Amino acid sequence: MHDTQISVRFCETDLLGHVNNNNFFIYMEDARIQFFNDLQLVDDDWNFILASIKCDFVRQVYYGQNLLIKSGVIKMGNSSFHIEQDIYEERSGELVAKGTSVIVQFDFDKQASKPLTATMRKQLEIHQMAAN
């Protein structure tokens, strides 16, 4: 699995004092971008689109907490792959949210999906895990 650390900022909380649910999608995006960069899946041309995203909220998160996002590939298709992202409160190790995303390699000129390359597949397989 690929790990990304996030520190919760005050501006990410709402009137109830906990992190607003919208911010979990931003945390997941930050982790996905780091995942793509670390696996060298992107270069000067960004060639991926987000086709679907889901997040289940398990526990409340507050300002000042540090989160650890563990990302792994749970499925690969011809031109797409599914990422599972488990978000933990770093100190306690408690699961606070669980997300999944479907990513598609996209040809913006043709406005159509395009197959993952052999190199991409090899990099993604390193982080492939069994589906839950």
Image: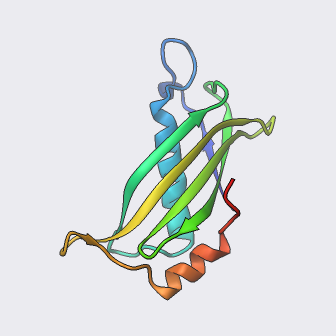
Q: In this view, does 59 lie to the left or right of 38?
A: right
Does 74 sit above or below residue 68?
below
Q: On the rendered image, what quadrant is the N terminus found in? A: bottom right
Which corner quadrant of the image does residue 58 belong to?
A: top right
Residue under the image location 34 percent in, 74 percent down: 44
- Percent from the top left, x then y, of residue 56? 58, 35
Does 127 sit above or below residue 33?
below
Q: Is residue 74 left or right of residue 77?
A: right
Visual colour scheme: rainbow
User: How many labels, in total?
Assistant: 0
Residue under the image location 55 percent in, 26 percent down: 19
Does 52 sit above or below residue 44?
above
- Percent from the top left, x then y, of residue 36? 50, 67
Q: In this view, does 109 lie to the left or right of 120?
A: left
Residue under the image location 51 percent in, 23 percent down: 13
Residue under the image location 44 percent in, 79 percent down: 116
- Percent from the top left, x then y, of residue 96? 67, 34
